[in-house]
């Protein structure tokens, strides 16, 4: 790794870490109803919203069923609204390019995709959606789905927290949701959008401009309210682009500086949430251990991706192209990457995007090297390298329960997590949450690979083609949304099945985790004794990491061997083996 | 689930849809138009009032007297801003091998005297298909050919490249790039009336 690449990685990760600490404390204050300096400005707005919703609804205490039920109801309504707007966009305002109504399959897929925070896009934004759809059917659920994931995690934290001993109250969904929107998501967007506009991202209601080019001919340049969408797309770990090329498009991501801003926006909330967890369950030491484990996985992932992409490919080397950086060019595997980002900023962005399950890309993963693409796949398979707003941490905690259980069995101690006994019901629920993920990935992926309507959509053949299908279902199940985009997902089969996978991936795991939270909340807290397994130690952090890797590897290794690993050896086999001999 | 909850859910989601799906983008559009009107409207390049492109959106630039832009995978034509996108060809796809080989051949044919390995960005298509930049090496690689075609001295071309080079953001982020749209526009204006439109 070159010094330039090294320092960009180090400084970017440090900046994210530095931002996450104060933001984490802020999150904890917001959701524990403590004072923040923003209260004088935001309180009147919140109170007005509470009045609209109805004070009874906002003040009632909710157990896990009430919390989950209201969350599902709100999400269902949002999904229906998105579906309706897309289906009738031809008859709605702000459609300067006169796009037709979106077809039912695609509208279902898109509605499922955006309420679940996935942002899988089986369409190209600039060639499909009206400006009204971009605002009301895309930007709106970007806020709503991010807030949903965040408050689900908050409710789970409350269940583990000291305030919830032998209680059933997980808080109030509506109140949490409103506070997440106004205090966590909307406010930063108002300040960061103008910065992105300054950097070059358009923010206009003009749908298209016609340019008369230097070399003759004309170019139609679509634009719209892009910058505001970009900010919530990243802050809410959403990932759906205004344009087909997503954050590779110069209007979505004009400069390396905007690239770093977008990267930091993706990272800050999930990282901060770990800090907030530590405060809300009164165990900052445990939070530091968790933060450390996730940060370790992220550092490994980003390093592997940067090195793999900078190494380039034999195909490009044999064509007589420069593969080493220097002399005014970046070398490496530049297929599907933008010059302004080079290898390093491309790989950092796509690593972060698949770790934090945002799914926006500034370089196209289908053309990445086998190892680079595999890093993206593995992070979504584990789905807890910080992960998306809220849900990533829930997954990480789920692995934590297994780690406690396994470690407890190994050393003969009662498995306890933050003073709550982990018993049969908890392990059953955690197992269900765990098993949904591989089931909804591997089963439909296998089906797609055996069916002509599945295979006909491939953009590449061989093991890379297998990776394309695998990637689509991993991305949908992890609610990531990035793609090996050579696969044409806009077919009835993929639209429907991927839509269903996204819905299961999102709500099944959230419901199981809330049920688990409800079960833990109802338990008395046992006193820590000499026989208690200490979980807020580096040793247990290592065990936690091992649990994640072993479970993840056992589940997905066969699929990886057939896809990226086979491709890696086919591509580099000769070099890899001769390298070993030396 | 009570009726009270139903009502709350309906009101919340409608209010939210209006606030975040309409008011927020419209307010930001207003702010952007007032604060940074040039960028908010797409960083357009105007020459004598005529829009000649956007600084940020690449163009298909070929010909002996121009700096070539990167290959573009947009369809149906390269640099089609209405349909951004990449080739999505895998790292060992034979089609990619073929594309790269023919691009290298085209470069060598345009300038048989050129030596040395080709900068990788000059023969690979970008992620957006609209990359407005090339690397500094990719610009230098083309200087000899352009100098012969336009009779502009190499030193002057190198000075032009320096002028349209954008350094790394904050001195260390990303890569230094040459904005090939602006560079070729400068060449075009320099040639003035000689070049037919």
Image (tube, coloured by chain):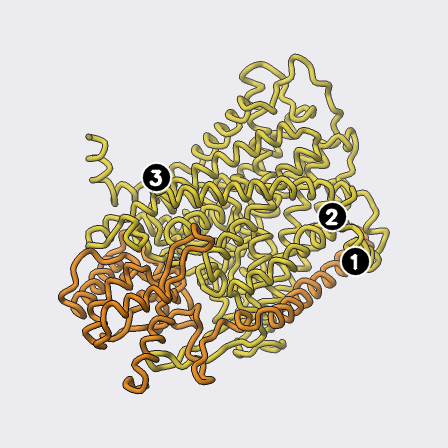
Looking at the picture, tell me which residue is in the foreground, B16 or B27: B27
At numbered mark 3, what does the secondary structure look like: helix, strand or loop? helix
Q: Hey, which quadrant is residue B196 in on the image?
A: bottom left
Picture coordinates of residue A191, whole percent (x, y): 64, 58
Left/right placement of residue B150 relative to residue B192 reads left
At numbered mark 2, what does the secondary structure look like: helix, strand or loop? helix
- Viewer-nearest of discs 3 and 1: 1
Per the image, the residue denoted by label 1 is: A45
Disc 3 and disc 1: Cα gap in Å? 53 Å
Mark 3 / mark 2, whichever is N-terminal: 2
Picture coordinates of residue A1, whole percent (x, y): 35, 41
What chain does badge 1 belong to? A
At 50% from the left and 42% from the top, the residue drawn is A13
Left/right placement of residue A112 relative to residue A71 reads left
Mark 3 / mark 1, whichever is N-terminal: 1
What chain does badge 3 belong to? A
Looking at the picture, tell me which residue is in the foreground, A321 or A570: A321
At label 1, counting other C-alpha atoms closer than 10 Å, the crowd grade (few under 14, some 14-19, many 20 or more) is few
Tell me the colour chain A is drawn in.
yellow
Q: Is residue B8 visible?
A: yes
Q: Hey, which quadrant is residue B77 in on the image?
A: bottom left
At 73% from the left and 50% from the top, the residue drawn is A179
């Amino acid at each position: 790794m070159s010094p330039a690449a090294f320092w960009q990685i180090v400084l970017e990760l440090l900046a994210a870490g530095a931002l996450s600490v104060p933001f984490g404390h802020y999150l904890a204050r917001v959701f524990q109803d403590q004072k923040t300096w923003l209260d004088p400005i935001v309180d009147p707005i919140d109170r007005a919203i509470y009045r609209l919703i109805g004070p009874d609804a906002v003040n009632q205490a909710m157990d896990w069923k009430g919390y989950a039920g209201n969350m599902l109801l709100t999400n269902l309504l949002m999904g229906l609204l998105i579906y309706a707007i897309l289906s009738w966009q031809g008859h709605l305002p702000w459609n300067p390019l006169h796009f037709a109504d979106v077809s039912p399959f695609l509208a279902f897929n898109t509605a499922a995709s955006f309420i679940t925070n996935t942002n899988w896009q089986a369409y190209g934004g600039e060639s499909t959606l009206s400006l009204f759809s971009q605002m009301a059917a895309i930007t709106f659920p970007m806020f709503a789905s991010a807030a949903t994931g965040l408050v689900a995690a908050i409710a789970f934290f409350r269940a583990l927290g000291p305030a919830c001993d032998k209680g059933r109250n997980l808080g109030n969904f509506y109140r949490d949701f409103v506070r997440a929107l106004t205090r966590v998501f909307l406010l930063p967007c108002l300040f960061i959008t103008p910065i992105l506009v300054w950097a070059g991202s358009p923010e206009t209601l003009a749908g298209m401009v016609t340019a008369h080019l230097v070399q003759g001919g004309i170019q139609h340049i679509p634009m719209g309210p892009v910058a505001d969408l970009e900010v919530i797309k990243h802050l809410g770990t959403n990932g759906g682009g205004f344009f087909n090329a997503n954050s590779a498009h110069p209007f979505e991501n004009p400069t390396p500086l905007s690239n770093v801003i977008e990267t930091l926006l993706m990272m800050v909330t999930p990282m901060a949430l770990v800090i907030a967890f530590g405060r809300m369950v009164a165990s900052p030491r445990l939070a530091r251990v968790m933060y450390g484990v996730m940060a370790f996985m992220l550092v490994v992932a980003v390093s592997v991706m940067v090195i793999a992409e900078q190494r380039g490919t034999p195909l490009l080397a044999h064509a007589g192209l420069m593969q080493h950086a220097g002399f005014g060019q970046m070398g490496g595997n530049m297929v599907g990457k933008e010059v302004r980002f080079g290898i390093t900023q491309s790989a950092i962005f796509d690593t972060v995007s698949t770790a934090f399950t945002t799914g926006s890309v500034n370089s196209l993963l289908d053309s990445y090297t086998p190892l680079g693409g595999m890093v993206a796949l593995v992070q979504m398979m584990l789905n807890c390298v910080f992960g998306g707003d809220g849900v990533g941490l829930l997954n990480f905690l789920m692995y934590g329960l297994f780690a406690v259980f396994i470690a407890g069995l190994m050393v003969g101690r009662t498995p306890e997590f933050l003073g709550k006994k982990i018993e049969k019901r908890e392990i059953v629920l955690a197992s269900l949450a765990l098993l949904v993920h591989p089931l909804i990935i591997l089963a439909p992926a296998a089906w797609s690979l055996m069916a002509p309507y599945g295979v006909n959509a491939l953009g590449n053949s061989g093991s890379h083609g297998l990776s394309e299908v695998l990637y689509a279902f991993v991305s949908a199940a992890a609610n990531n949304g990035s793609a090996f985009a050579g696969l044409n997902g806009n077919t009835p089969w993929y639209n429907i099945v991927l839509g269903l996978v996204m819905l299961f991936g999102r709500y099944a795991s959230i419901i199981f985790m809330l049920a688990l939270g409800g079960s833990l909340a109802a338990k008395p807290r046992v006193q820590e004794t000499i026989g208690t397994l200490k979980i807020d130690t580096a040793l247990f952090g290592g065990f936690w990491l091992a649990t994640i890797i072993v479970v993840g590897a056992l589940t997905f290794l066969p699929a990886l061997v057939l896809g990226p690993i086979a491709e890696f050896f086919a591509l580099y086999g000769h070099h890899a083996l001769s390298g070993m001999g030396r | 689930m009570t009726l009270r909850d139903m009502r709350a859910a309906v009101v919340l989601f409608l209010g939210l849809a209006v606030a975040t799906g309409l008011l927020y983008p419209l307010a930001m559009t207003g702010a952007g138009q007032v604060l940074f009107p040039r960028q908010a409207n797409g960083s357009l390049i105007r020459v004598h009032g005529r829009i000649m492109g956007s600084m940020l959106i690449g163009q298909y630039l070929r010909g002996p007297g121009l700096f070539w832009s990167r290959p573009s995978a947009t369809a149906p034509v390269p640099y089609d801003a209405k349909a951004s996108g990449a080739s999505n060809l895998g790292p060992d796809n034979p089609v990619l091998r073929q594309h790269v080989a023919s691009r290298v051949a085209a470069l060598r044919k345009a300038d048989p005297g050129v030596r040395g390995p080709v900068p990788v960005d000059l023969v690979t298509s970008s992620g957006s298909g609209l990359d407005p930049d090339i690397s500094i090496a990719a610009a230098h690689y083309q200087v000899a050919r352009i100098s012969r075609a336009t009779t502009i001295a190499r030193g002057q071309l190198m000075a032009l490249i320096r002028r349209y080079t954008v350094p790394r953001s904050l001195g260390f982020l990303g890569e230094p790039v040459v904005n090939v749209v602006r560079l070729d526009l400068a060449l075009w204006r320099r040639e003035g009336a000689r070049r037919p439109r």
